[in-house]
Image (tube, coloured by chain):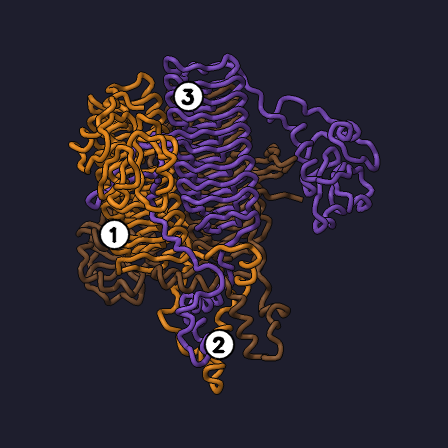
Chain colours: A purple, B orange, C brown
């Protein structure tokens, strides 16, 4: 992919640049590869003890290993505290981003009043509406639409067929993958005589610096105020962000996550794939939400939160699930054993812990 | 956004037009804003008692309030039964839709036999295939594809990069957001010698009037008959509608909902975000399905239905989940207490309520 | 749709071509239709006994029926073992694919070094980057982007607005629906000083022959090695496939499924809609995963696996869910009855079956 800087590098040069301790012969490597597919000119990494047995069979020329594995092989190796991070840094050395070739493709439509930096690259069939701006060194791929008065910052990369609606602001060093949609209308409606009345969505989407937005991810504009994505947030593919959501700096969301309107997620959080976060709630910094978990209320304490049904062989599931549906009844029967004279106790006394908040969340989220 | 009708308006004019009772000074407002961000020239609303304390700190010039809050402030205020609806109507006054500028962009490809209304707006890089029709006052955004013989009704708005496949019919006043796909093939296959044999999907998608379709939502064409979306249905983003689904009038689906083939959903229903509705079932009118709930069988009674795992701190979840997997065993042990002489009772007698229907639903849904 | 081969056909001709036994009059049919909408010139099918009563009211000219229904009607009928498969084959006779019209649209951009087969069709506003190849008889729809050195095999159909990133390889007879994205970056990042450091994704996506990819589905390129989709795999819409996933031949995934990085799914599997499969695990051949199920660990035995919360009326759910949160406590109370002298037993002795593996899966999946 990359045309630059892919010359082979000596291990001593890597260590001089990135730290770590070199053990074994100082060879030259030209590529990062997986343990499985690495050849003699490649460097591979291993961070977990449990894959230790893979070392014996690798053909890699050199390895990146944690201190606990320093003596696990006679191959050339760099010992460091975080082999995964080290691998990331070496990878970045060997695969710098595709260069940006300044210029506007002849087929592109740039409306009046749009301002394109001289160093930006605008691909074929791009449409940049009036008053929009594209910053220095940013590449806009084929078929993208940048709406009226929208701003894309410097050194960004917008892949093919992305749509950024009017007035949205995207910071510097932002990567947006194909099919992502930034700034479509939030889902705001009021009911009137049994019909839905659309509420104009007049807020914007404001995206900070160093954000990455995965393929086909959608981030809705705010209803009145803005939807805000802070610096360093990373979105995987097919994520849905509702209107007026706020996501704190350096939070990462895995694929297929849905965040409903006006949810505020803190910084340095992680959200596992397929999780759903309801609207109008707050999630503190440093919260980790497991895959496929539904968050129905505010989380004010850092930690890991989970709510997924444990899978099992279908018949076993079926038997347990049929009991689950009437679990309250089971609890009452146990109460009856413990206090035989008060068989209805459970129905009056709440069980330990807060009762479960209804997850009912209709599709329309009101503000105010 | 809007170029029209955003002149400031007196509160007495609003009341004359939209009803409600004006209390306090008759000032002029020029914008709807949130309580938090409103300034002296803005009108804000509050519908829920629990946010009452926000009134004290707002800088809004005027408020829209429910009768229960009529004396909560000395600010200019309009008292009405449904402040959220009132806010919606005022919002619509201040933010009318972007005007449509009639004409076909020079770059657009309009194939022979396609009929574009003289008042329609066709953006850059739009491709309108032969025999397709676009109605009066409809705007088709950049990069859209309207397939052969497809119809887009009047006064619609189709944002950038939407695809509408051949023969699909879209009604009047329909909004389709970027990346939505209408009429791709349904997922219909038969098995033959361990391979999948594709079944041609020859039905269409028929969409009524006043429908809104969110960004990256997909609505599959029917296998033989049509997929039907009735008037006034509202789809949020990233919804998947399988072939031959029917959705009743004025039903609203929140983001990331999936509806499998041949499910029929009634009118005036709501479906919460991330819910999954299996195929070949019926859901009555006025049913409300909670977020992240899997619907596995027909629902014939109006009401709210839920089936999400309550989240908790991860370790607590882990302890409960390990019991859940063998909940049937727990139930048998309780049976043993109640009728010590018949320890196997549970395995014979079905627990109260219908047994849980297998959710197994392979990916291919057969008709007939 | 189709211009070819839709001439009416005699039932004896169908039987001669596709097998089965003809009962009743040898009429001519011109279309496959549903039982409900079929007319006298149409053939319909019925495979399930429970819909038997629909036969009485159909206006179809002929039926495809299983042996068990051979005497259920006096209409012309073809009796065969698998009416659904038979219907599929007849459907394919009547609705062959849209013909491909060789040629490159004048508006398309084909960069230097790209090789387009003379029999391929390249639509308006397509961009084919340098070194890319499009095979014999393949149609590329309007607005598609085929990246540098990417390959699309022969006899494929790529609908409007698809993006295939650089270096990805797509086999023969592959259908890709609108909005699908093949080869966007996998979600690979390392943490450094509380920020995320992007890891270049230098692998590819390799897609076999006879694959179908639904609308808005996303398949990420590998981090170092490739993401691999084997022959005959069928993807419904809005599926997310993470980097370095491998999916075995003739496996089918229903809509909205998410598969996290480095998961390996066997061949001839099915995955129900909305299921989530975590990363770095293996699923054996012939495994069937139910809709909305979260798979958290390796499955090495064929069978059907389920893990969805059974839905119920909201209040009933709320009562059961509040008990579920503290199910471990309930189990301990039962222990106390069984062994009154050891009330803390449950906390020490693992319940039957393996403890539940944490589903916590942060969004970043490491290799090695």
- Tell me if label 3 and label 1 are in contact, CB under 8 Å: no
Q: Which residue appears at 51% of the width and 77% of the height?
A: B333
Task: Report the mark closest to the observer, 3 or 2.
Answer: 2
Give the percent coordinates (x, y) of residue B94: 26, 27
* Residue assigned mark 3: A126
Secondary structure of the residue carrying tag 2 is: helix
**Residue C347 position (above or below residue B267):** below
Q: Which mark, by number, is residue B266?
A: 1
- Rendered image quadrant of residue A327: bottom left
Callout 1 crowding tier (Cα within 10 Å): few <14, some 14–19, many ≥20:
many
- Rendered image quadrant of residue B231: top left
Dot placed on the residue nearer the N-terminal end, 2 or 1: 1
**Residue A223 position (above or below residue C324):** above
Task: Report the mark closest to the observer, 2 or 1.
Answer: 2
Q: Which mark, by number, is residue B141?
A: none
Query: In which quadrant is the N terminus of chain C drawn?
Result: top left
* Residue assigned mark 2: B332
Q: Which residue appears at 50% of the width and 73% of the height?
A: B330
* Residue at the outermost left position: B16
Query: In which quadrant is the C terminus of chain C drawn?
Result: top right
Tell me how many marks there are: 3
* Residue at the outermost bottom position: B341
CA separation, marks 3 and 2? 66 Å
Q: Which residue appears at 46% of the width and 15% of the height?
A: A116
**Residue B96 position (above or below residue A136):** below
Q: Are marks 2 and 1 on the same chain?
A: yes
């Amino acid at each position: 992919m990359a045309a630059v800087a892919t010359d082979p590098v000596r291990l001593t040069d890597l260590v001089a640049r990135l730290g770590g301790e070199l053990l074994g012969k100082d060879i030259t490597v030209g590529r990062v590869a997986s343990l499985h597919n690495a050849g003699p000119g490649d460097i591979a990494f291993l961070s977990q003890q449990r894959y230790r047995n893979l070392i014996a069979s690798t053909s890699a020329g050199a390895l990146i290993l944690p201190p606990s594995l320093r003596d696990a092989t006679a191959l050339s190796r760099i010992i460091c505290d975080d082999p995964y991070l080290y691998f990331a840094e070496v990878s970045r050395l060997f695969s710098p981003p595709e260069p940006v070739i300044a210029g506007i493709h002849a087929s592109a439509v740039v409306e009046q009043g749009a301002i394109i930096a001289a160093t930006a690259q605008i691909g074929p069939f791009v449409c940049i509406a009036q008053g929009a701006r594209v910053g220095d060194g940013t590449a806009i791929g084929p078929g993208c639409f940048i709406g009226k008065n929208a701003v894309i910052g410097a050194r960004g990369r917008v892949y093919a067929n992305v749509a950024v609606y009017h007035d949205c602001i995207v910071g510097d060093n932002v990567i947006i993958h194909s099919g992502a949609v930034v700034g479509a209308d939030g889902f705001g409606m009021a009911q009137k005589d049994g019909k839905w009345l659309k509420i104009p969505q007049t807020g914007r989407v404001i995206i900070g610096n160093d954000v990455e937005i995965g393929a086909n991810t959608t981030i809705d504009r705010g209803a009145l105020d803005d939807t805000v994505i802070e610096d360093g947030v990373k979105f995987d593919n097919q994520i849905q962000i509702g209107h007026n959501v706020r996501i704190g700096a350096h939070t990462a969301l895995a694929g297929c996550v849905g965040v409903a309107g006006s949810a505020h997620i803190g910084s340095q959080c992680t959200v596992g794939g397929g999780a759903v976060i309801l609207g109008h709630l707050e999630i503190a910094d440093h919260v980790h939400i497991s895959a496929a978990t539904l968050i129905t209320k505010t989380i004010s304490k850092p930690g890991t939160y989970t709510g997924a049904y444990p899978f099992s062989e279908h018949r076993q599931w079926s038997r347990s699930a049929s009991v689950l549906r009437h679990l309250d009844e089971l609890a009452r029967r146990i109460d009856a054993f413990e206090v035989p004279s008060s068989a209805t106790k459970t129905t009056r006394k709440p069980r330990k812990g807060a009762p479960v908040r209804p997850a009912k969340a209709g599709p329309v989220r009101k503000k105010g």
